[in-house]
Image (tube, rainbow, N blue to C red):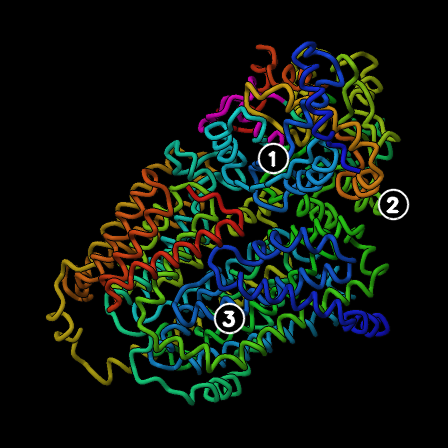
């Protein structure tokens, strides 16, 4: 099943390449040449066992299988400083030879956007190899009296939400609450979403979100037992990069966008919506993103791009992916790079709004 | 339920699965002896292989590895005083002191037998508690977790040894240094001085390796000779068995503590062993031997950690909430196999649940039994010239410390805690309370703010919280009463105030004085800087630093008045070894790790052994082995 062309073909392709370097099949052959027998170093800037680590380790063997030349992936966990240390290391050591990747989450993107101290990396000039979504599902406890998103504005009891930190993956969800004008008491400082779910089951909180894979396996059974009411998802972006679509996996629930339209009878707009869109794109839609150093050869990026479609039609990836990631598709880095960059480069009003939101409402020191 | 338990046992005894269990145990046994890697190191290495097997065999392999790690780490702790995981700290204190006395066999035999008992208790409790574990986990919220951590801290005060003030000082220092980094429940950086390395504080592995590992190695290199200073006792093995028989109550209590801390997510084996150790030493009638080779504390700790690893899986399996990083990797493996732990998991996959219990328990029990049988031979290692052992040991300690954050600063931090541990040892400041305080900072602070945000002060009203408060009050009352009785007895026996002999023999300007001045500066600076913090990130640093400052002042005054012997400066041979290590560590960024390691080991062997020119090939061999290890474990050394 190996797709490596034999030597004779290669010679022929090589000759052709010098004549017409832009032709499709030629590029394919050069891509095969590019990664044959090579090893790609992947830095995961978190300790082993987290979402970025599990997702990256899950995807890597499928990339080996489908990238022309079958490169090996050597994954290193460089945890610390909420991913800042590993990302700095990547900035310092990553060469533009197509053999280094930083596989990380919005935990690296937000400190960069907010220009936090200690950030030595620049994401704006990086290239994107791949991305995998991690969607959120917001749900409530039955005793809040909320049976559907329409009841969100008039809960029977005060809403209590448990989170990790305002600049963590909670940020887009807190912005969604702000956008929807919900009166929620936020209790931050939990160690992870697992302990938060236990606090919900214990009744200490009554308003929560979990990522899709956990929602499908843990919260949905609770919902069937009428112990949790699923409400809405973070949504997904349309072709223009606007966050108006439903989550592709949990598409039976409305998106934040739809809930806003239902509650307020108008399109969301302004800096709060802009801030939500940018943070939701970085946290959810491009949940785990593979970044490559500036100046990475186009052949390398093309090889990842070509592999994405093949990975997504791999039956093994589809069945196992449902269990590990919730079933999101591997996104083609070439196709999403523009959207990722525009989410990262928030407009001055949005950046100012985000800064004020975090400083004034959550006492973040920026 | 019992059908499932039986069929799981039959499924496990399939020859191939048994083989996989043993493969896992073999890998875990080796990894347990290397510092810094622990269960998570074992899992990350085996995971790619395990995922190629059928779920039952793969899980047996993974659990075989994690189940034995806390048994094999006992070997390095007893023989070299090096805790390869922070949870083997108590064993490194007491077991190593026993080995120095020539009783390595007794220590090893007792520790492995206690481990075996802990593993058994854990497995039995886990089996029996499957139906009630769910409600139990749900009964323990942030307020209850906070109180459990404070119980741990209270018992740690039982580790104070001869001078309560030094013990409290040590615990405050640990608690305070634990607050470095991002505050757990406020978006604030504390004491990081804009230094990214400190963003999430000091790594526990480095603190433990420095305070105990480096400090012990330095002292022994300075003294020369073999680990066993006194005549080696071959009969020690059976003495260890008798220790276990004499202390069965302490071991059962330790296992019980281990079980409880295993079931609770996010506190884990490190806290459980220290608390079991503190409990055992606090309730001991005769405390004269604590910290100097008293088997009781070690036996309780060994029982506790093996009970914890088995029951650690309860929150993982019942709620998909991993108890620690190793459990998180294990959870990922379950997902890949297509199992979703959670409320329904146990009901639907009772056989798999039992397979997990049995694999983990078998690994812990068989592993301890094999080690127990081998302990007379392992103990003989203590007769070897220590310099020969020290070379690979310090190399592996360096390798393990680099696992923490994978930057050269890891080595510098290791050196810093090594010097601290060495001075503390020389000034007779207890190091155990430091480590307990350090471990418990995060659970105390995090859970206090969660409980307070969720419930206001009414969190104090919960029945479990009230019960735990009662435990603390009774414990403190007993401790004070006992201290009072002891003081009265001493006063009755010798009415003269501090013996002039000790005061006269040691200078005032000793390591004790140096340490208390350093502590004074740290606490003072800490309080000053904390004044700028937001209220919710200021509380815990101040709660550690203010009492710490006051106790330091009293200790300092005692030193200056000559009431507390500041003890002698360490001998030149030890200072020289610290200097060699420091030079090597500062050279690493310029020349790379392996050239430095090679040269440093030659110097170490030349100065501390009689190898002479044989030092060269031996250092080369050790360096090559470390290179191999770093490749095998994918550690990107500079």
Give the SS element for disc 2: loop
Query: Are tags 2 and 1 found on a single chain?
Result: yes
Q: Upstream in the sequence, badge 2 or badge 1? A: 1
**The quadrant where residue B452 appears:** top right
Task: Name the mark nearer the viewer: 2 or 3.
Answer: 3
Q: What residue span does the magenta drawing correspond to?
A: A104-127
For residue A308, above or below residue B416: above
- The residue singled out by tag 1 in the image is A38
Q: Are marks 2 and 3 in contact (CB under 8 Å)?
A: no
Answer few, some or many: residues within 10 Å of disc 2's Cα (few below 14, many 20 plus, some between 14 and 19): few
Q: Which mark is residue B301?
A: 3
Q: Quadrant of the C terminus of chain B?
A: top left
Tell whether position A111 is magenta: yes
| Mark 2 chain | A
Between the residue at mark 2 and the residue at mark 3, the CA separation in whole angstroms equals 43 Å
Q: Are marks 1 and 3 in contact (CB under 8 Å)?
A: no
């Amino acid at each position: 099943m190996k797709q490596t062309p034999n030597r004779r073909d290669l010679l022929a392709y090589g000759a052709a390449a010098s004549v017409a370097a832009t032709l499709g099949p030629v590029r394919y052959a050069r891509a095969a040449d590019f990664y044959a027998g090579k090893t790609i170093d992947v830095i995961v800037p978190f300790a082993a066992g987290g979402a970025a680590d599990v997702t990256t380790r899950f995807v890597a063997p499928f990339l080996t299988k489908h990238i022309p030349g079958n490169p090996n992936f050597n994954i290193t966990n460089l945890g610390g400083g909420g991913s800042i240390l590993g990302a700095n290391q990547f900035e310092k050591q990553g060469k533009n030879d197509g053999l280094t990747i930083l596989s990380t989450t919005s935990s690296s993107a937000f400190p960069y956007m907010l220009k936090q101290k200690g950030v030595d990396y620049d994401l704006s000039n990086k290239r994107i190899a791949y991305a995998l979504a991690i969607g959120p599902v917001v749900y409530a406890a039955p005793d809040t009296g909320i049976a559907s998103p329409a009841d969100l504005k008039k809960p029977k009891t005060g809403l209590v939400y448990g989170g990790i930190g305002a600049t963590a993956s909670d940020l887009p969800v807190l912005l969604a609450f702000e956008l929807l004008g919900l009166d929620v008491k936020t209790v931050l400082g939990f160690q992870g979403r697992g302990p938060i779910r236990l606090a919900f089951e214990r009744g200490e909180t009554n308003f929560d979100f979990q990522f899709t894979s956990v929602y499908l396996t843990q919260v949905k059974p609770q919902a069937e037992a009428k112990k949790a009411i699923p409400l809405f998802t973070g949504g997904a972006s349309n072709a223009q990069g606007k966050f108006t679509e439903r989550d592709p996996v949990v598409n039976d629930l409305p998106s934040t966008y739809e809930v806003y339209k239902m509650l307020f009878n108008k399109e969301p707009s302004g800096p709060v919506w802009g801030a939500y869109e940018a943070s939701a794109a970085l946290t959810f839609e491009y949940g785990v993103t593979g970044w490559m150093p500036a100046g990475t050869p186009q052949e390398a990026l093309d090889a990842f791009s070509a592999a994405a479609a093949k990975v997504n039609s791999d039956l093994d990836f589809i069945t196992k992916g449902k269990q590990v990631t919730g079933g999101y598709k591997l996104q083609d880095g070439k196709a999403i790079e523009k959207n990722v960059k525009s989410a990262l480069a928030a407009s001055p009003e949005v950046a100012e709004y985000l800064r004020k939101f975090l400083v004034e409402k959550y006492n973040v020191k920026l | 339920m019992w059908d499932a338990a039986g069929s799981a046992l039959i499924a496990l005894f399939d020859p191939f699965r048994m083989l996989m269990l043993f493969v896992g145990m073999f890998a875990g046994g080796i990894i347990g002896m290397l510092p810094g890697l622990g269960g998570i190191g074992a899992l990350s290495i085996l995971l790619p292989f395990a995922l190629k097997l059928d779920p039952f065999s793969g899980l047996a392999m993974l659990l075989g590895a994690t189940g034995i790690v806390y048994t094999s780490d006992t070997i390095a702790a007893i023989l070299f005083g090096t805790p390869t995981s922070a949870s083997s700290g108590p064993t490194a204190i007491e077991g190593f002191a026993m080995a120095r006395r020539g009783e390595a066999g007794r220590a090893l035999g007792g520790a492995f037998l206690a481990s075996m008992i802990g593993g058994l208790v854990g497995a039995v409790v886990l089996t029996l508690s499957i139906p009630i574990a769910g409600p139990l986990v749900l009964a323990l919220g942030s307020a209850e977790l906070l109180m459990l951590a404070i119980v741990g801290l209270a018992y740690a005060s039982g580790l104070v040894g001869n001078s309560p003030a030094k013990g409290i000082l040590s615990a405050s220092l640990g608690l305070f240094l634990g607050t470095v980094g991002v505050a757990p429940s406020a978006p604030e950086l504390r004491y990081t001085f804009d230094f990214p390395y400190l963003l999430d504080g000091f790594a526990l592995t480095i603190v433990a390796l420095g305070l105990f590992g480096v400090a012990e190695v330095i002292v022994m290199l300075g003294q020369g000779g073999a680990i066993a200073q006194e005549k080696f006792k071959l009969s020690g093995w059976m003495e260890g068995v008798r220790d276990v028989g004499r202390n069965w109550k302490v071991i059962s209590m330790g296992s019980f503590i281990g079980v409880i801390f295993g079931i609770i997510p996010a506190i884990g084996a490190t806290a459980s062993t220290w608390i079991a150790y503190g409990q055992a030493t606090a309730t001991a009638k005769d405390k004269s031997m604590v910290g100097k080779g008293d088997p009781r504390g070690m036996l309780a700790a060994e029982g506790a950690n093996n009970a914890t690893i088995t029951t650690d899986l309860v929150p993982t399996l019942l709620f998909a909430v991993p108890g620690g990083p190793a459990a998180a990797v294990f959870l990922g493996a379950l997902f890949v196999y297509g199992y979703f732990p959670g409320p329904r998991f146990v009901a639907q996959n009772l056989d798999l649940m039992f397979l997990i219990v049995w694999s983990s328990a078998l690994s812990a029990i068989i592993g301890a039994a094999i080690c127990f049988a081998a302990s007379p031979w392992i103990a003989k290692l203590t007769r070897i010239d220590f310099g020969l052992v020290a070379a690979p040991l310090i190399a592996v300690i360096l390798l393990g410390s680099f696992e923490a954050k994978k930057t050269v600063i890891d080595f510098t931090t290791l050196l810093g805690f090594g010097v601290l541990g060495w001075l503390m040892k020389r000034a007779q400041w207890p190091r155990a309370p430091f480590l307990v305080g350090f471990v418990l900072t995060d659970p105390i602070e995090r859970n206090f703010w969660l409980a307070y945000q969720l419930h206001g002060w009414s969190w104090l009203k919960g029945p479990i919280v009230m019960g735990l408060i009662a435990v603390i009050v009774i414990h403190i009352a007993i401790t004070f009463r006992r201290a009072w009785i002891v003081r009265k007895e001493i006063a009755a026996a010798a009415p003269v105030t501090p013996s002039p002999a000790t005061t006269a023999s040691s200078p005032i300007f000793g390591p004790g004085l140096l340490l208390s001045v350093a502590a004074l500066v740290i606490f003072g600076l800490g309080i000053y800087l904390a004044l700028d913090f937001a209220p919710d990130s200021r509380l815990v640093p101040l709660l550690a630093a203010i009492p710490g400052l006051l106790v330091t002042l009293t200790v300092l005054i005692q030193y200056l008045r000559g009431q507390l012997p500041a003890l002698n400066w360490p001998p030149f041979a030890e200072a020289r070894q610290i200097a060699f290590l420091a030079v090597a560590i500062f050279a690493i960024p310029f020349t790379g790790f392996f050239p430095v390691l090679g040269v440093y080991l030659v110097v170490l062997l030349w100065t501390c052994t009689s190898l002479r020119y044989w030092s060269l090939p031996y250092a080369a061999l050790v360096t090559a082995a470390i290179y191999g290890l770093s490749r095998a474990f994918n550690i990107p050394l500079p």
